[in-house]
Image (spheres, rainbow, N blue to C red):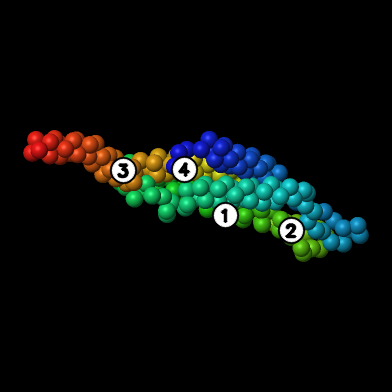
């Protein structure tokens, strides 16, 4: 299986868009402030935009699509004929397969957890003048970690696809063809010619 530029472009594009969305989600995290109600009897939490939740879920979906594409093309590393052989390409393919999945799962966990937490709004109120009312907000760095892991997932997926493609075109089946049929075919005309020469001498 040769490396397809279009597949690499799709994987790269989806990961980069997901990375940008994750960075945007980190910058647009929901914040809250405690304000009194109109009668000045209770205080409650007022939240601003939930844009980070939409950004985070969008990045989650794009990353999932990209991972599906690369594993669909490579048949999830399980069925490539060339991978029956041994070599450095197969070893690197195994390494980057594991690396891409670990970074992918880490990124998805951060994006999903961050989106869920960012969408949560404190529901209770407190008596007016109470200073310790807690407004639940997402802590800083969750989406940033998701963005970093998304970038690592992109690198791992591209290198895995490249190594898998190289192993799938240079493995056992190619060597079987070169070493088996390739070695026996050239000798057939020579043996046949020698047989005909012997028969002619007998005649």
**Sequence-first disc among 2 and 3:** 2
Mark whose residue sits in front, 2 or 3:
3
Q: Which element carries disc 2, helix, strand or loop? A: loop
Q: Position of residue 1 (x, y in %)?
A: 44, 42
**Sequence-first disc among 2 and 1:** 1
Q: Alpha-carbon distance for marks 1 and 3?
A: 45 Å
Mark 3, residue position: 177
Q: Name the one closer to the observer, 154 or 168.
A: 168
185 sits left or right of 144 in the view: left
Disc 2 and disc 1 in contact, CB within 8 angstroms: no
Q: Position of residue 138 (x, y in %)?
A: 66, 52
Mark whose residue sits in front, 2 or 1:
1
Q: Alpha-carbon distance for marks 2 and 1?
A: 20 Å
Disc 4 and disc 1 in contact, CB within 8 angstroms: no
**Sequence-first disc among 1 and 3:** 1
Q: Position of residue 144 (x, y in %)?
A: 59, 44
The image quadrant where one finds the C terminus is top left
Q: Position of residue 55 (x, y in %)?
A: 69, 47
Q: Residues within 10 Å of mark 2 (few under 14, many from 20)?
A: some
Q: What residue occupies the far front of the structure in this picture?
A: 203
**Sequence-first disc among 4 and 3:** 4
**Sequence-first disc among 4 and 1:** 1
Mark 2, residue position: 121
Mark 4, residue position: 161
Q: Alpha-carbon distance for marks 2 and 4?
A: 42 Å
Mark 1, residue position: 109
Q: Residues within 10 Å of mark 4 (few under 14, many from 20)?
A: many
Q: Which element carries disc 4, helix, strand or loop? A: helix
Disc 1 and disc 3 in contact, CB within 8 angstroms: no
Query: Residue at left 55%, top 48%?
Result: 69
């Amino acid at each position: 299986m040769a490396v397809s530029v279009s597949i690499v472009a799709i994987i790269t594009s989806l990961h980069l868009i997901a990375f940008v969305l994750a960075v945007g989600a980190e910058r647009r995290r929901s914040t809250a402030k405690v304000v009194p109600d109109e009668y000045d009897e209770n205080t409650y939490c007022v939240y601003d935009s939930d844009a980070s939740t939409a950004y985070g879920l969008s990045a989650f979906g794009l990353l999932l699509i990209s991972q599906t594409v690369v594993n669909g093309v490579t048949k999830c590393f399980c069925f490539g004929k060339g991978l029956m052989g041994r070599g450095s390409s197969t070893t690197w393919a195994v390494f980057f397969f594991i690396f891409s999945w670990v970074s992918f799962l880490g990124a998805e966990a951060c994006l999903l957890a961050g989106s869920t937490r960012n969408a949560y709004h404190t529901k209770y109120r407190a008596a007016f003048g109470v200073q310790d009312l807690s407004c639940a907000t997402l802590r800083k760095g969750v989406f940033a970690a998701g963005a970093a892991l998304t970038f690592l997932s992109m690198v791992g997926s591209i290198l895995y696809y490249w190594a898998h493609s190289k192993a799938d075109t240079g493995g056992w089946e190619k060597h079987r063809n070169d070493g088996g049929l390739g070695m026996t075919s050239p000798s057939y005309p020579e043996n046949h010619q020698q047989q005909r020469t012997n028969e002619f001498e007998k005649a």
